[in-house]
Amino acid sequence: MSKDTAKLSFSGGEHEFSVREGTIGPSVIDISSLYKETGAFTYDPGFTSTASCDSQITFIDGDEGVLLHRGYPIEQLAEHGDFLEVCYLLLYGELPTKTQKEDFDFRVTRHTMVHEQMNRFFTGFRRDAHPMAVMCGTVGALSAFYHDSTDISDPHQRMVASMRMIAKMPTIAAMAYKYHIGQPFVYPQNDLDYASNFLRMCFAVPCEEYKVNPVLARAMNRIFILHADHEQNASTSTVRLAGSSGANPFACIAAGIACLWGPAHGGANEAALNMLAEIGSVDRIPEYIERAKDKNDPFRLMGFGHRVYKNYDPRAKIMQKTTHEVLGELGIKDDPMLEVAMELEKIALHDEYFVEKKLYPNIDFYSGITLRALGFPTNMFTVLFSVARTVGWIAQWKEMIEDPHQRIGRPRQLYTGAPKRDYLPINKR
C-alpha cells in the first residue's frame, strides 16, 4: 500500500482516496468507497482504466512488450519449458520440482479420458455445427457428468475440477474436430506428452499407425504456452465474473469459451487467414497495402498491431520462429496463402508506415499460418485457443475463489433512458 493519496473535488467537497502499488506496473487509485462518499460512480466503458482485482498470476507491459507469468518472461517459458510445467506454474505460483512435475503430469494424464456417455452427447449436434458451438455446449455439460467436483468451497474438489478441465479440454476439442469431419473419435494415449497426445487425437485414424512428428509437437506445445494466460482480458474477466456468483467451475469455463468465440477476441487468427485468402496472391499485396494506409477505406490488415502491445508482441517473436520451423519441416512451398503471408510479413517489418505506427505482425498472424500448416481448418483455431487458455481461466478462477475479499461482480451504469413516467392504458397511448 502506498502512502500517497488521490484527492477529488466534487460537488463542493474534498475527498481522499488511497493509492495502491503493485509489484510492478502502474499505481491504482482505490475508489471502492467512492459511491459511499460522493454518491457518484466512475464511467469507464470497457473497464480499460479500471483494475477489477489484484492478481499474482500474469503481468503485461504493453509499451515495453513484456509478458510475465508469475515473474517468468514468456520467452523463457516457451523456449525451455513445456505446457504442463507452465500449467503448474500458473496454478501454484512456482515452477515444479522434478518430483512435483512427474506427479502433476501423471494426474493430468490420468484424467484425459472423458465419460463414455459423452460420446453420445456429440450426436445431438448437427454435423456441420461450428466446433466452438460444440465446445460451449459440451464443456457446459461437464458439471452433469462430474458433479462430484462442483463444490467450490471444498479445496479438494476445486483441485480435482482444475485437473479434469486441463486434462479433458484437448480430448473434447479433438472430439469436436473429429465429429465435424465425420471421423471416429480417437482415445488419448497415456505414454504421450500433452501436445503429442492432442495431435494424435486430432489426426490419427484407426486404420493406420500414426507417428507424432516431434517438430510439429514442439510447435503445438509452444502455441499452448503462448496462449495460456493473458491477464484480465475479456474471456478471463468473464470467467471471474461468472465465478463471483458461486457458479461451478465447468459453467465458468463454458462462459469463457463463449466470450472467446467473439471475433474481436479469440477469432483474430481466423480473421487474419480470411484476410490472406481475400488478398489471394502476392501480386495483389501492393493494392491492399495502399488500402490499409487509406483512412477512408474500411479495409484493415488483420493480424497486425495489438490493443495492449504498443511494441512487438513478445509472443509473436517466438511464434514467428515456430512458424518457419513448421513450414520448413513440412516443406510447404506452393501454398498461395502462405506465400502471401510471408511476403506481407517482410513488408510489415520494413515498410516505414507500419514501423512508425508499430503495426508489427502479432501472435494471431503467425499462429493462424502455423495452425493451417499443421492441418487444422480455420474454424478450429479458436477451439485450440480455448484448450490453451483453460489453465489461465482456471488459475484466475481459483485465485478469485480463494481471495477473502472476493465479492460478486456488479458493474454500475450511467442511465440515459426515459425518466420516471406513469403507465397509460392502451386506449390512451
Image (cartoon, grey):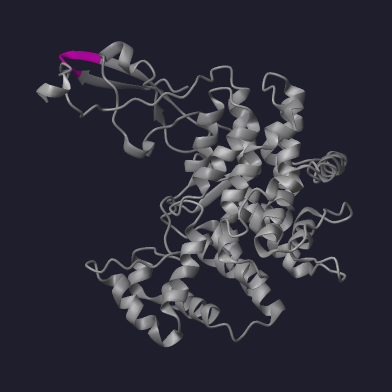
Q: Is residue 11 magenta?
A: yes
**Looking at the rendering, which quadrant does residue 222 occupy?**
bottom right
Residue 9 lies left or right of residue 372; in this view the side is left
Q: Is residue 262 above or below residue 428?
A: below
The spot of residue 67 in percent (x, y) is 55, 49
- The magenta-colored residue range is 10-14
Whether residue 353 is visible to the viewer of this picture, yes or no, is yes
Which residue is painted at 68% across and 32% down in the image? 143
Question: Residue extending furthest front?
Answer: 427
Which residue is painted at 77% across and 31% down in the image? 160
Question: Residue extending furthest left?
Answer: 428
Residue 70 lies left or right of residue 429; in this view the side is right
Label tally: 0
Q: Is residue 304 above or below residue 77?
A: below
| Main secondary structure of the magenta stretch | strand
Which residue is painted at 47% across and 69% down in the image? 274
The spot of residue 256 in percent (x, y) is 55, 40
Which residue is painted at 73% across and 53% down in the image? 81
